Image (tube, grey):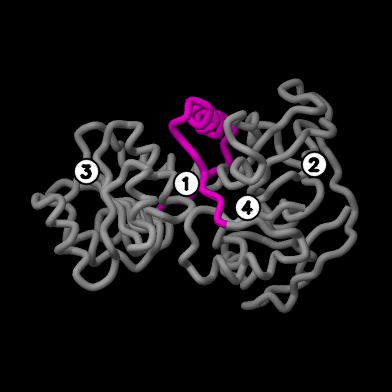
Amino acid sequence: MRAVTYDSYAPDNSKLRVGEVADPKVGPGQVLIQVKAASVNPVDWKVMAGGLDGMMDAVFPVIPGWDVAGVVTRTGPDTPEFAEGDEVISYARKDVVGAGTFAEYVAVAAPHVARKPSGLDWPQAGGLPLAGLTALRCLERLEVGVADVLLVHGAAGGVGSLAVQLAVARGARVIGTASERNHAFVHALGGEPVTYGDGVVDRIKSLSPVGVTAVADFVGGQLETTLAVLSLGGRHVSVADPTVEQHGGAWVWVRPDGAKLAELAETADAGRLTVEVAQTFPLDKVGDAFDASRGGHTRGKLVIVP
């Protein structure tokens, strides 16, 4: 099969290659998925730079990518949950960095797989798993509900835009930081946009003078703002800044979870969750997608379509 690979860590795209590799083996309790779409997440190029080497082993050559939407083409022994032809999605992170989703096929453990939301097309479905599960896990850690005013740092991004929608669906009031060009987008999601940068604390307090009860940081480097606007007893989490743990917050890492992904699929099918796709790329343009992701100003998701 064709796949994107790199044979050693690199801080740039110099090691990326596209070529033929062996088809994945399909073990007990696994499904083989023909990839229709696989979204890019910042963790993909951070892993390529060696950023998780102290936490996860890598087997080179590495196929990057942790998101997938596609069609089941084969099942391993004792996998009654799925059958050939099923349309599915998965956050396909494994315990070892190696056989990822930027390829024509990927084998995934069945408990990490859910059925594709019928209301999303392939690129949208491919953009849902990691970002959606991250957003959902953050809201669950914060216990966001109808009594909350939630601040979302990075409300127009891939994770932030989903968190805004999920929090609104829970009945929370949501304030979201975004560039001015994305204010209309955040408003359409149900959030109240504020421009990030100098003066952001004053702008947030102008919308909620008593502060906010919860903060979800999907950007990093926002701790000062978070603490300045968080009300007494408020809760905060970050997916990008582990130092929040020193200030009463939680550093959140999402886990592969087919059951939770099925919840997101149901929410999407009910029309309460959409995935904004900024751009799609073929396999041989993964480097361009990584560059766009590194820029940090993408609205929604960047998706690889093999």
Task: Report the residue marked by disc 4.
Answer: 39
Determine whether, in the image, residue 149 is placed left or right of residue 35.
left
Query: Which is more N-terminal, label 4 or label 2?
Result: 2
Q: Which is more foreground, mark 1 or mark 2?
A: 2
Task: Give the crowd class for mark 1: few <14, some 14-19, many >=20 residues within 10 Å.
Answer: many
Task: Report the residue marked by disc 1.
Answer: 134
Rendered view: 78 above or below 199: above
Residue type at the position of mark 3: Val
Q: Residue at x 86, y 44 (%)?
A: 25
**Dividing the picture into quarters, in which one does residue 258 lie?**
top right
Residue type at the position of mark 1: Thr
Q: CA distance from mark 3 to mark 1?
A: 19 Å
Q: CA distance from mark 4 to mark 3?
A: 30 Å
Q: Secondary structure at mark 1?
A: helix
Image spot of residue 285 (x, y percent) = 72, 66
**Dividing the picture into quarters, in which one does residue 303 lie?**
bottom right
Task: Report the residue marked by disc 2.
Answer: 34
Q: Secondary structure at mark 4?
A: strand
